[in-house]
Image (cartoon, coloured by chain):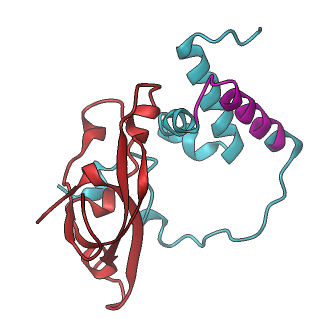
């Protein structure tokens, strides 16, 4: 589990290149470091639900990124807040 | 390798080739077709024949050229059809 304020890195993983998958982690944040804002709750893993498989509940977080860390042309203060499941996050 | 080269074709956020195209922010009324597709999907979920996650997976599996050609709700019908055929639900029943 992660707590608000924890610095996290999104895994630089590309399952879409290995077969049929359903992933809710956008490509552009893979490998990018951000900060946990809040735990939104635990939800059945959509990566399994998408294939009608039994799905474990996984923690979902709001994670904040500096846009400049993703897109070089972004304004310095721009931020991006997105929902990411805990199993996609690691401690840098 | 460039991240954009590794993304799935439906994963469109911030993709350079769309950055010069204005975003359509006009409200669009739902057509009768749109409402019917939405109702169908809600019935399939209520009867536990297909989840919204399966709908999304099926939309993402539409080949790229078709994905961009089809309307929002046309993608839904494509996904519903593909998913039900795969799971063996009797579409004529």
Quadrant of image for the N terminus of chain B: bottom left
**Across the whole image, how many numbered discs are drawn on residues?**
0
Name the tint of chain B in the rendering: cyan
Quadrant of image for the C terminus of chain B: top right
Which lettered chain is shown in red? A
Q: Left or right of A46: which side holds A67?
A: left
Q: Nearer the viewer, residue B88 or B75?
A: B88
Looking at the rendering, which quadrant does residue A57 occupy?
A: top left
Q: Residue at x 65, y 37 (%)?
A: B76
**Which region of the structure is painted magenta?**
B35-51
Q: Left or right of B55: which side holds B19?
A: left
Residue B2 percent coordinates (x, y): 22, 58
Q: Residue at x 61, y 70 (%)?
A: B23
Q: Nearer the viewer, residue A15 or A53?
A: A53
Q: Left or right of B35: which side holds A31?
A: left
Q: Is residue A47 above or below residue B9?
A: above
- Residue A80 seen in the current view: yes
Please check the rendered image and state whether residue B40 is part of the magenta-colored stretch, yes or no. yes
Residue B3 percent coordinates (x, y): 25, 57
Please check the rendered image and state whether residue B64 is part of the magenta-colored stretch, yes or no. no
* Prevailing secondary structure class for the magenta stretch in the rendered image: helix
Looking at the rendering, which quadrant does residue A82 occupy?
A: bottom left
Q: Residue at x 63, y 28 (%)?
A: B80
Q: Is residue A46 above or below residue A28?
A: above
Q: Is residue A8 above or below residue B74?
A: below
Q: Left or right of A18: which side holds A44?
A: right
């Amino acid at each position: 589990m992660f707590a608000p304020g924890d610095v996290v890195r999104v895994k630089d993983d590309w399952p879409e290149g290995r077969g049929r998958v359903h992933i809710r982690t956008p490509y552009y944040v893979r490998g990018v470091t951000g900060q946990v804002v809040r735990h939104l709750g635990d939800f059945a893993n959509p990566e399994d639900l998408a294939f009608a498989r039994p799905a474990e509940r996984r923690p979902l977080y709001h994670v904040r990124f500096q846009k400049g860390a993703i897109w070089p042309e972004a304004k310095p203060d721009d931020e991006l807040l997105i929902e990411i499941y805990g199993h996609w996050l690691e401690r840098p | 390798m460039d991240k954009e080269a590794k993304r799935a074709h439906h994963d469109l956020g911030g993709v350079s080739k769309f950055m010069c195209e204005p975003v359509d922010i006009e409200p669009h009324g739902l057509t009768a077709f749109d409402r019917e597709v939405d109702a169908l999907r809600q019935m399939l979920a209520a009867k536990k024949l297909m989840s919204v996650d399966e709908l999304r997976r099926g939309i993402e599996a539409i080949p790229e050229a078709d994905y961009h050609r089809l309307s929002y709700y046309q993608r839904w019908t494509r996904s519903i059809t593909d998913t039900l055929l795969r799971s063996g639900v009797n579409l004529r029943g």
